[in-house]
Image (cartoon, rainbow, N blue to C red):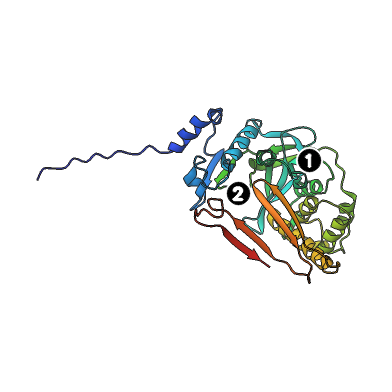
């Protein structure tokens, strides 16, 4: 029997990079980053790792990964050394990984002037996806480690970060870093965009003015955190400001105050305010007719129905086929909660 000659041909790797650069040559400009400066990771089973921005498997009109990468590279080119001078919206960040020992720090953009919109979601409604991604990607994080149970031991850096979280307006700031910023870019369309980060050596800030109502809550060490949240909300303080100060442990009883990871503080403040509003709504008079309200934004359609009956609540969420949470092409997926 004659021998069979088999030739093994190795498939070129990272073909998607070539396809990406050919579709948009601007991505190839200044791509001089090392693996230590810009790291790309993907989650197991992520559609993004399969799609690579070319097939739009998530059903969106434009790939959010490419939009994030484009914004990230633009801000990266503006940070060349170990000092970042600009303005903070104000903005701070408290991580959750490694809890109770977490990364904390101020966030600032290498832009002078009013940067308040960069961390003020209440002003984002009506903005495009690209604009929102641009806002988030412009903020650079300077980080240091803190034990959330003993924040008072973290020293002057934490005190300044807390002062920043209570500011009523943007603050001129200079972040001195221990090394050049780098980022971990996750190939996942459900991960919010974030700018680069680096360990913080020191922080210098210009003059700042605290929100007077938050200042009162901060100095009232006999006021529970939940009560402080509701008082501020009732006085018209934006939710974003409350969440920011809450995460820095600015409210609560004396030494029982704790730093709260940013993600958890958003959930906690939302829960406190929502339960308060729910109890208030129960005392409202019932509507005497059926009412329908609707809105469309960023590819989402919202419908609210008010029905003349005893108070109750039910929410439906529907995903069309070939969309992010329903990759199936067969039928609409519907989930409900009440």
Residue drawn at the location 38% of the way across and 37% of the way down: 12
- x and y percentages locating residue 205 in the rendered image: 80, 39
Q: Which residue is mark 1?
A: 116
Q: In the depicted view, which residue is nearer to us: 169 or 291?
A: 291
Residue 310, located in which quarter of the rendered image? bottom right
User: Is residue 65 among what the camera can see?
Assistant: yes
Q: In the depicted view, which residue is nearer to us: 221 or 139?
A: 139
Q: Which residue is mark 2?
A: 191
Q: Residue furthest bottom?
A: 310
- x and y percentages locating residue 99 in the rendered image: 65, 58
Q: Is residue 313 above or below residue 73?
A: below
Residue 305, located in which quarter of the rendered image? bottom right
Residue drawn at the location 61% of the way across and 57% of the way down: 318
How crowded pointer 1 is (Cα within 10 Å; few <14, some 14-19, many 20+) is rated as some
How crowded pointer 2 is (Cα within 10 Å; few <14, some 14-19, many 20+) is rated as few
CA distance separating discs 1 and 2: 22 Å
Q: In the depicted view, which residue is nearer to us: 127 or 175?
A: 127
Count of marks overlaid on the render:
2
- x and y percentages locating residue 177 in the rendered image: 67, 38
Q: Earlier in the sequence, mark 1 or mark 2?
A: 1
Q: Residue furthest left?
A: 1
Q: In the depicted view, which residue is nearer to us: 104 or 135?
A: 135
């Amino acid at each position: 029997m004659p021998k069979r000659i088999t030739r093994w041909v190795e498939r070129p790797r990272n073909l998607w990079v070539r396809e990406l650069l050919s579709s948009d040559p601007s991505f190839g400009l200044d791509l001089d980053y090392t693996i230590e400066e810009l790291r790309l990771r993907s989650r197991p089973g992520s559609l993004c790792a399969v799609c690579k921005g070319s097939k739009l498997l998530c059903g969106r009109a434009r790939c959010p990964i490419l939009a994030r990468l484009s914004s990230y590279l633009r801000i990266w080119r503006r940070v060349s050394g170990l000092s970042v001078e600009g303005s903070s919206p104000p903005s701070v960040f408290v991580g959750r990984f490694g809890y109770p020992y977490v990364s904390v720090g101020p966030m600032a953009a290498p832009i002078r002037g009013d940067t308040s919109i960069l961390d003020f979601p209440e002003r984002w409604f009506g903005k495009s996806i690209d604009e929102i991604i641009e806002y988030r990607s412009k903020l650079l994080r300077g980080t240091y480690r803190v034990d959330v149970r003993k924040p008072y031991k973290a020293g002057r850096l934490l005190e300044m970060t807390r002062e920043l979280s209570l500011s009523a307006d943007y603050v001129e700031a200079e972040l001195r870093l221990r090394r050049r910023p780098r980022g971990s870019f996750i190939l996942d369309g459900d991960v919010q965009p974030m700018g680069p980060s680096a360990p913080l050596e020191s922080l210098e800030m210009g003059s700042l003015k605290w929100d007077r109502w938050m200042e009162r809550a901060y100095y009232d060490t006999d006021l529970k955190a939940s009560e402080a949240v509701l008082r501020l909300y009732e006085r018209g303080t934006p939710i974003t400001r409350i969440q920011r100060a809450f995460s820095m442990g600015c409210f609560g009883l004396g030494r029982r105050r704790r730093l709260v990871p940013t993600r958890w503080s958003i959930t906690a403040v939302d829960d406190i305010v929502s339960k308060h509003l729910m109890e208030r709504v129960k005392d409202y008079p019932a509507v005497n007719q059926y009412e329908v309200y609707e809105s469309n934004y960023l590819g989402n359609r919202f419908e609210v129905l008010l029905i003349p009956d005893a108070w109750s609540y039910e929410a439906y969420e529907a995903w069309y086929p070939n969309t992010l949470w329903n990759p199936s092409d067969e039928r609409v997926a519907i989930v409900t909660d009440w």
